[in-house]
Amino acid sequence: MSTRKTRRRRPHLYPTRKWWATQITAVTTLATAWVTTGAWNKPLTLAAIGVVSQALVVYLVPNGEQAPRPGARSDSQPTAQPTAQPTAMPTSRTVPA
């Protein structure tokens, strides 16, 4: 048995590399559209608002809960639902002559 205490990790305030990669992609796409149109216009303004809003949402929303350790079972975990069996698809068709 381990004597090491588990601490709850505090979220970092700095963005992750994945966040930076998505922002660079979004801003580069917006810049490409600006160069293509030749002038700033209303659709580009709307796209810029979209880039800023998605950046804020992705930064503020956590990635999700940490998965439980294998073998750990709690009452809060959903039970597996039965899945439908796939139906057999015909592999060949008979074409009338």
Image: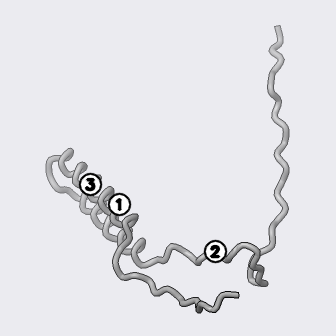
Q: Amino acid at mark 1?
A: Ala
Q: Amino acid at mark 2?
A: Ala
The label on residue 84 is none
User: Residue 83 placed where, x, y %?
Assistant: 82, 57
Q: Quadrant of residue 40?
A: bottom left
* Closest to the observer, 22 or 3: 3
Q: Residue at x 44, y 83 (%)?
A: 11
Q: Nearer the viewer, mark 1 or mark 3?
A: 1
> Left of 88 or right of it: where is 76?
left
Q: Nearer the viewer, mark 2 or mark 3?
A: 2
Secondary structure state at the residue bearing disc 1:
helix
Q: Residue at x 75, y 79 (%)?
A: 72
Q: Residue at x 23, y 49 (%)?
A: 32
* Closest to the observer, 1 or 48: 1
Number of residues whose C-alpha sits closer than 10 Å to that of mark 2, classed few (under 14), some (14–19) or many (20 or more): few
Against 74, residue 59 (above or below) is above
User: Residue 9 placed where, x, y %?
Assistant: 49, 85
Q: Earlier in the sequence, mark 2 or mark 1?
A: 1
Secondary structure state at the residue bearing disc 3:
helix
Q: Earlier in the sequence, mark 2 or mark 3?
A: 3
User: Residue 50 placed where, x, y %?
Assistant: 34, 65
- Residue that lies at the very extreme toward the left in this rendered image: 39
- Name the residue beneath numbered marker 3: 28
Q: Quadrant of residue 30?
A: bottom left
- Name the residue beneath numbered marker 1: 21
Number of residues whose C-alpha sits closer than 10 Å to that of mark 1, classed few (under 14), some (14–19) or many (20 or more): few
Q: Mark 2–mark 3 contact, CB under 8 Å?
A: no
Alpha carbon separation for disc pair 2 and 1? 25 Å
- Name the residue beneath numbered marker 2: 67
If the image is split into quadrants, where does the C terminus sit?
Answer: top right
Q: Residue at x 83, y 54 (%)?
A: 84
User: Residue 46 placed where, x, y %?
Assistant: 29, 62
